[in-house]
Image (cartoon, grey):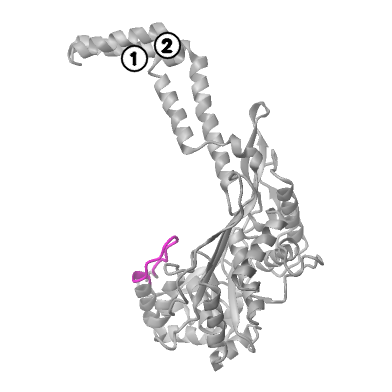
Amino acid sequence: MSPPLSPPSPPVELGEAEGFGDARIDRLVVEPLAGAWEAALRDRGVRLSDRALRFRGELGLPNDRPIVMSGHQPGVWHPGILAKHMGVEAASRRWDAAGAWVVVDQDEVASWNVAYPAVARGERGVERLVRGVVKAEGFVGRDVPALRASAIRLGDVNASPATASVRAGLQGIRGAIERRAGAANAAEQMAGAARELMAIGTGGPSAATGTSDVSDTVRWFMASAIARTGLFAGLIERMRRDARACADAYNAAVARTVVEGVGVQMLISREDGAAELPLWRVGSAMGSRRERVYADMLGSAGEGELLPRGLMMSGVLRLAGCELFVHGLGGGGPRGYDRVTERWFEYWLGAEEGRLAPVATVSATGWLGLPEWEGRVASDADVAAAVWRRHHARHDPKMLGDEAGAVEKGRLLREIEALHGRGERSARAFRAMHDGLASVREGRTGEMNRYEGEVEGARARRAQLDVVQERSWPFALYEEWQMTELRSELEKRMGGE
């Protein structure tokens, strides 16, 4: 396994704010410390293997400098993913490295669905803070056609963006997607839209000029391009010769690695014993859906139809594509899912041949800023209290304003207690008490409706709390100064100041 670069550094809490509704980037994680990043980039960058030189050349990546790499599925990501890209940019500039970003285009993701905070007008004109969605049918991927602008629609016609920055961000997202309706596929369309939005809305090198691309510091490429490399073909041939060795090594790595968060599933053989492999098969026709790959399918797959799944992709890229790979909280760290990849490649290829580039971790979260809603939310305790009051109001006439009913209930309770809850007299008293309570409720429907309304209101305000406290909105919805602050802090963490 690749040794850890260094002990993790503590997260940085950014920005002072009076309440949780105030706009700010509030948490930045960069692990390990900058010195370990520099050491990793200088360590392997000076002795590239022939395998790495060929692989990088086939992907269009430079081979004259060390490479720091990251990536994600195409989309307008939350600040944590954006922070990875900014981290790659900062590290590249700081240590004269090349930055690379892999667009995971072989996955099928619902990137068209863009969540945003919205204000909806409900019954009696009452405004509610809700989670709106701009969406379109289908997935984003290499084998999905680009989306026409007419297919994009708001999820709730009665909801409007909660702030000016959200409204502007949604318009920017839609415009960036529309301008790429002629892209070769949906993945390239969404990736291009993200690049444009990053260039003009995150305080980067292109922001001042309004150009429509991110800095040349980071080279973007599609993950499906890996399938056309000699290294990938060689690993497929190795699977063809001994699929069971690959699958067994993979499953052993899964079994022996503790992973937090999203778990890694084992490869499951078919009933006939054919080993499942960490690949997707996707037909050459546009619109083809991906399918799992088993050992007996390797010989029949057409050129370019076999694509790497997640761990296979990161393993190949860390094997020969970079000196340092930047993950988020899920993949990085001592219990990130890519620790499985390290063990798998070691078990499968051997400790030396399967040695992977080390991993760093970058992530961030940010409050969008909805202070006007801060006093219009409820906690779980508030909801529980409202539910308690509604429940007890059904059994306590006094809570419904019926003093006589409360006295009668007390009398019947004492009678039941005196009879020790046994016999027909006790049963009659018990029935009489509940009949009396039902009668009180029927006569006090207004009061009961008030308690019911308290529960509904508390639950609605609790839902608003989730929206106010959400810290992972698409980055284009945030104020530009927030993204600029994030970039500046990352530069500081890399020692650029």
Q: Nearer the viewer, residue 244 or 13?
A: 13
Q: In the figure, is residue 398 to the left or right of 93?
A: left
- Residue range in magenta is 254-266
- Provide residue 295's location: percent of width, then percent of height: 42, 78
Residue 430 shows in this picture: yes
Tags 2 and 1 in contact by the CB under 8 Å rule?
no
Sequence-wise, the earlier of marks 2 and 1 is: 1
Residue behind mark 2: 440
Give the residue at x 24% y 9%: 415
Count neighbours of disc 1 (C-alpha within 10 A) and say few if under 14, some if 14 to 19, many if 20 or more.
Answer: some
In this rendering, the answer to whether 146 lies above or below 404 is below
Q: Is residue 259 magenta?
A: yes
| Main secondary structure of the magenta stretch | loop
- Outermost residue toward the front? 497
- Provide residue 349's location: percent of width, then percent of height: 41, 85
Q: Nearer the viewer, residue 165 or 301?
A: 165
Identify residue type, mark 2.
Val
Residue behind mark 1: 434
Residue 306 shows in this picture: no
When asked about the image quadrant of residue 112, the answer is bottom right
